[in-house]
Amino acid sequence: MKGFEIYNIGSGVPVSTQELINTLEIVTGQQATIIRAPSRVGDVRHTWADLTKAQCELGYQPAVSLREGIGKMVDSLARLV
């Protein structure tokens, strides 16, 4: 699409699934029920946002931690319910 750009936005730091679950549990005060299953063909083992383009072209720098961002999201969703 001419006239559009795509930028990765995030912390630029990998976060494990377990770290994400732990953060969600802390912020929500709820304990997650986790059902572990073997990896499947095609599962992505590691991924994180490469911020290089956003940093170079937009001067982007992450300003919100994972915990703070999840807290804001939970607060926003709670107001909708």
Image (cartoon, helix red, strand yellow):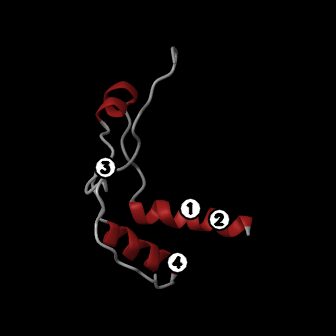
State the image coordinates of residue 54 (x, y, percent, origin top left).
Answer: 37, 32
N-terminal of the pair, mark 4 or mark 1, is 4
State the image coordinates of residue 68 (x, y, percent, origin top left).
Answer: 46, 63
- The numbered disc on residue 21 is none
Q: Which of marks 4 and 3 is in front?
A: 3
CB under 8 Å between callouts 4 and 3? no
N-terminal of the pair, mark 2 or mark 3, is 3
Q: Which of 43 and 7 is in front in this view?
A: 43
Query: What residue would you read off at disc 3?
Result: 48
Query: What residue would you read off at disc 2?
Result: 77
Q: How crowded is mark 1: few (under 14 residues within 10 Å), some or many (20 or more)?
A: few
Query: Quick one: which residue is furthest to the right in this view?
Result: 81
CB under 8 Å between callouts 1 and 3? no
Q: In this view, does 59 lie above or below 67?
A: above
Query: What residue would you read off at disc 4?
Result: 28
State the image coordinates of residue 26 (x, y, percent, origin top left).
Answer: 44, 79
Q: Residues within 10 Å of mark 3 (few under 14, many from 20)?
A: some
Query: Quick one: which residue is furthest to the top in this view?
Result: 2
Q: Which amino acid does label 3 sit on?
A: Trp
- Residue name at image x 55 percent, y 62 percent: 72
